[in-house]
Amino acid sequence: MDDVRVNDRLTIPAAELAWRFSRSGGPGGQGVNTTDSRVELSWDLVGSDLLPAMLKERAVQRLGARLVQGVLTITASEHRSQLRNREAAAARLGGTVAGAIAPPPRARRATKPSRGAVERRIAEKKRRGKTKENRRSFPSD
């Protein structure tokens, strides 16, 4: 079992990961009842010393609903082979942790539309209203 790469600076060592395998539902033909292709990958986020305190706090706050006693568990069962499910779970864990420790996005600064944009919008509304007005049938005298 390999380490899981989160980003350029952070890699979760294989020693901190726990793998579980079980039978998967879904496609698989005759082998579906005999192969343990479903993968559960768990990482003890709270108990790990890998992340600095600030990043760990941010990750715990963002992943709060997905953590069970500080442990993040990722499940993969979309592929028929255990190997591909293991790769999918590892990639998903890396992406989940990377998203959880990413810095918050910059605050949006409110802007006003330009005068030209406002004028174009109003001109288009007038054009549209004129089109609809021309569709009306007037009662004949």
Image (spheres, grey):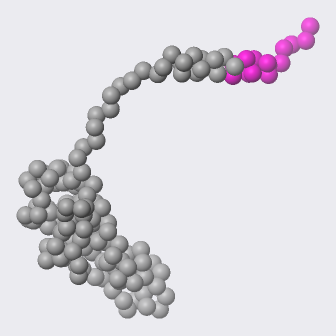
**Residue 109 point in image, percent of width and height:** 33, 28
* Residue 126 drawn at (x, y percent): 66, 16
Q: Which residues are magenta?
A: 128-141
Please identify the residue farthest to the top as the structure is shown.
141
Does 138 lie within the magenta span?
A: yes
Instruction: Confirm whether residue 32 shows in the render.
Output: yes
Quarter of the picture holding the C terminus: top right
129 in relation to 58, above or below: above
Q: In the drawing, does residue 46 fall left or right of residue 91?
A: left
Q: Is residue 69 visible?
A: no
| 134 sits left or right of 34 in the view | right
Along the horizontal axis of the image, is 130 left or right of 73?
Answer: right
Which quadrant is the N terminus positioned in? bottom left
Residue beneath the point at 25% across and 61% down: 7
Instruction: Give the image location of residue 88, x and y in percent.
Output: 35, 72
| Residue drawn 25% across the image and 58% down it | 98
Q: Nearer the viewer, residue 99 or 116?
A: 116
Is residue 91 magenta-colored?
A: no
The residue furthest right is 141
Q: Residue at x 83, y 18 (%)?
A: 137
In the rendered image, residue 81, in percent from the top left (x then y), is placed at 39, 84
Depth check: give the residue in front, 39 or 107: 107
